[in-house]
Image (spheres, rainbow, N blue to C red):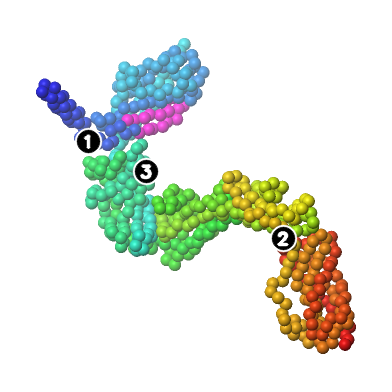
Amino acid sequence: MKKNTKKRRTIRRLLIATAFALLMIPASVSADVVGKKITENYTPDRENPLSKIEYTYRSDGKFDMVLTFDIFAAKYAVLHVNDARDYVLEVSQNNQLIGSQIINAPDIRKLNGKLVYDFKDAQKVPIVRPEEELSISFKFYSDYYKTFQPRTVRAPEAPNPNLLEGMTGYGQVEKMNSDGTEYTEVYATFRGTQGPDAGETLYAYNLDDKSIYGSSNSRTVKVWIYRNKIKPFNIADQSPRRWMLVSAKDPNTAAGIAEANAAKATSLAFDSPANIKSEMEDIYRFSSTSTRYDQAAVTVYKDRNHNTGYADGVEIYNYVKGKGEANLYQEFSFDSGKDHGKFNLTGLLPGTTRYYTVHTIRYNNGLEYNYWDGYYYTVRTENFKAPGFSAVKMGPKQVKMLIKVPADQRAKGLSTMYVYRGSKKIKTIKSNGKATITFTYSAKKANSYKYKVKAVCAKKTSITKSTSAKKPKSNTYKRPGRLNSNINQITPYATAKFVPWQFSYYDKKIKVTGYIVNNRMFKMKKYKFKVYVYNNNKKIATKTVTYKNIKKYAKKKVTITIKTKKKPDFVNYSTGWGTSNVSTKWGW
């Protein structure tokens, strides 16, 4: 029982002490600004080494001070500072000494001439009122006595919990609800005299309807003032309202600070949504390309709006799917005749995706109008792909390899391709800018193996793509379909013609297989003609041949062999042909 009585007495005393402490805080001082720091900077010179004063607001409405001096920066003292024994600091107010202290000179030399002095051990501690004038003097003793000229400073104003500096502009955002309903939101942008304190947020509080309309971790706060269709609200009715920007840890604390300092609120009236809208909605075009898997180019073109003409610029924001807009990424001005903004993404991995939103910007009467149409755009680099690959028989011991490098990974250094014969690596090829890379592989029984190509991403070698293993193809091109069975459809009556149908190459020989077509009631006793062969749009072979005794109204299949030193590829390159009659001898 006694323990409980003693505990109650202790709590009662604590409550009384706390209440007394609160009563000691002047009514004019808000608890939210106690401890606020204000810094004033000065340029040290040969007359006075003062470089900075940090003021800390006290609960009694005055300031504590921390002074910083740069002895070495005061050029007059450079020759003597190392000989000094002691320094004397004095702070005067109305010609009365209110702060003083002697400082040991070696302590300053250890700090390279910099002294940060907070008067903790001073004989007199200066405590000053807001906007009060002070005279700060400094002197040191060595073999002679040196006094710097006093510097007169003025303490800052008392901190104001209302950090609202003013309104900088309007914005409009087009949105869509989950049920597909489209709606518009309009906001005003407030700028603070500073950002929030550490661990706090800047809140925009409306004292007329006791609500917070926006918050931010920077000096800029978006204040939502109009919404239609989805839970509509409208405070953009051109009626003045009282606002405060307050730094606080949470909304409730912010509201309490604002209400306690209502007399310091700022009165603002907004423009109507209709007038704001007339400055908005601009037309633009967004395009992106990725010619390399590690790069993407983005361009935003301005266009003309029928109400207000061209925008003055655009802002590009990062966008996070499912979370919305992130930080500002790029901004472009459309002055000096520019009609677009462009930026490049580099150093990316294959299949990288980025999302962006576009805001059009217009300036009018000192305000910025910011419009977002609610869309986000996807920018994506290509996925890493397997190359095209073919192996073609060229001779008993030769295989021609052809690798088609994907366009986005063919630039020099973007990929490495390994050619395998079975499990054995037989060739390493690095991308060099070429779309097609060929080489000939020679080995005993080269035609009987299977081959494949493994492509490896240079940016991240764990990213690979392989072709399927395949045996070499016959180096042959065959025209699709069949030869028409109706001779009249092939060549007119009383004429003859050679129709090439298949082309092949192997071991230094081209073979052309085709049909001699005789559309006459007489047989051809002797038929002489020329055949031309083209590969990859180049003529590679020509031969004149003669055939005898071709029956009337008949088709005769023949194969023409042409020796050549050239090595055509009828699989991967275009194949062409031509024929011309030289002479024909008819008979029964």
Q: What residue type is labelled 1?
A: Ser
What SS does tag 1 mark?
loop
In the rendered structure, find residue 217 and report the number of the disc placed on it: 3
Which mark lies nearer to you, 3 or 1?
3
Q: Specify the quadrant that holds the N terminus.
A: top left
Residue at coordinates 79% horizontally, 82% vertically from top-left?
554
What SS does tag 3 mark?
loop
The percent coordinates of residue 226 (x first, y second) are 31, 58
Sequence-wise, the earlier of marks 1 and 2 is: 1
Side of 238 where 486 appears, left or right: right
Q: What residue type is labelled 3?
A: Asn
Side of 28 where 380 appears, left or right: right
- Residue at the spot of label 1: 28
Q: What residue type is labelled 2?
A: Lys
- Whether residue 479 is situated above or below residue 217 in the rendered picture: below
The 10 Å Cα crowd at callout 1, few under 14, some 14 to 19, many 20 or more, is: few
The percent coordinates of residue 339 (x first, y second) are 53, 59
Work out whether residue 326 or residue 40 is closer to the camera in this orientation and state it.
Answer: 326
Q: Give the range drawn in magenta.
A: 38-56
Q: Specify the quadrant that holds the C terminus.
A: bottom right
Q: How far apart are marks 3 and 2 (CA)?
A: 66 Å
The 10 Å Cα crowd at callout 2, few under 14, some 14 to 19, many 20 or more, is: some
Q: In which quarter of the image is residue 224?
A: bottom left
The 10 Å Cα crowd at callout 3, few under 14, some 14 to 19, many 20 or more, is: some
